[in-house]
Amino acid sequence: MTPEEILQALYDETLVGNAPRVLELTEEGLTLDMEPQTLLFDALIPSLEEVGARFERGDFFVPEMLIAGRAMAGAMERLRPLLAETGVETVGKFLMGTVKGDVHDIGKNLVNIMLEGAGFEVIDLGVQVAPEKFVSAIEEHQPDIVGFSAFLTTTMPMFKANMNALEKAGLRNDVIVMVGGAPVTQEYADAVGADGYAADASQTVKRAKALLHEKRSKVPA
């Protein structure tokens, strides 16, 4: 296969979520001395963006997004160390976790994959993340954005508890805070004082980039 054919096939196979084939094609590209960033920016990311666009149009649903995301994640495992070596610039650092009392992570994991695919470095704290754990992780990793995920209406009040913990630690102004999850709404995000909310994974990426751009454009050079 030529490099052009590999890129096209990578795009197509990621779109349909054919994880074994995506990995094979990634390996094939690397054996042809194709640059890891070429595979990422010319095939994998555009494919995942198309997945997001189809989801928004109602042509794709969560299962299709998940399998495409997993296919991309497999390729990313292989490419990540190579990208680090080449010093590919990341868009920003995103710290993510499901709030205390909540063990749901499918949505969060999908968001993580989409963020990684868009060039973010993602630090995932997992599920049942207590406010103090978010605080110590922010101090350790110094992310640009922190994401709180909740799937249950009973755990949504943890957003406010987390915000209070950030305020108390003097970190609130250092990070952009995004919230999301099935029962979460824009109104609720506003009520708890979050900077951003997104209804699904593809919107999260767009919103995260917009918020980051906004924040950076305010920073004096």
Image (tube, rainbow, N blue to C red):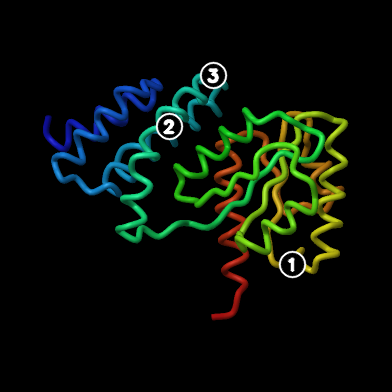
Amino acid at dot 2:
Glu
Mark 3 Cα-neighbour bin, 10 Å: few <14, some 14–19, many ≥20: few
* Rendered image: mark on residue 50: 2
Tell me the mark number nearer the camera, choosing from 3 and 2.
3
Amino acid at dot 1:
Asn
Q: CA distance from mark 2 to mark 1?
A: 34 Å
Residue 165 versus residue 185: which sits nearer the camera? 165
* Rendered image: mark on residue 188: none
Question: Quick one: label 3 or label 1, which is nearer the N terminus?
Answer: 3
Q: Which residue is mark 1?
A: 173
Q: CA distance from mark 3 to mark 2?
A: 15 Å
Which residue is pictured at 73% across the width and 52% down the height? 134
Q: Which residue is mark 3?
A: 63
Which residue is pictured at 82% across the width and 48% down the height? 190
Q: Secondary structure at mark 1?
A: helix
Quadrant in the picture for residue 127 = top right
- Residue 179 image position (x, y, % from top left): 72, 44
In the rendered view, tell whether residue 53 sits above or below residue 157.
above
Mark 1 Cα-neighbour bin, 10 Å: few <14, some 14–19, many ≥20: few
Q: Secondary structure at mark 3?
A: helix
Q: Would you say the residues marked 2 and 1 are in contact, meaning their CB atoms lie under 8 Å apart?
A: no
Quadrant in the picture for residue 220 = bottom right
Tell me the mark number nearer the camera, choosing from 2 and 1.
1
- Residue 171 image position (x, y, % from top left): 75, 66
Question: Quick one: label 3 or label 2, which is nearer the N terminus?
Answer: 2
Residue 50 versus residue 201: which sits nearer the camera? 201
Residue 192 versus residue 72: which sits nearer the camera? 72
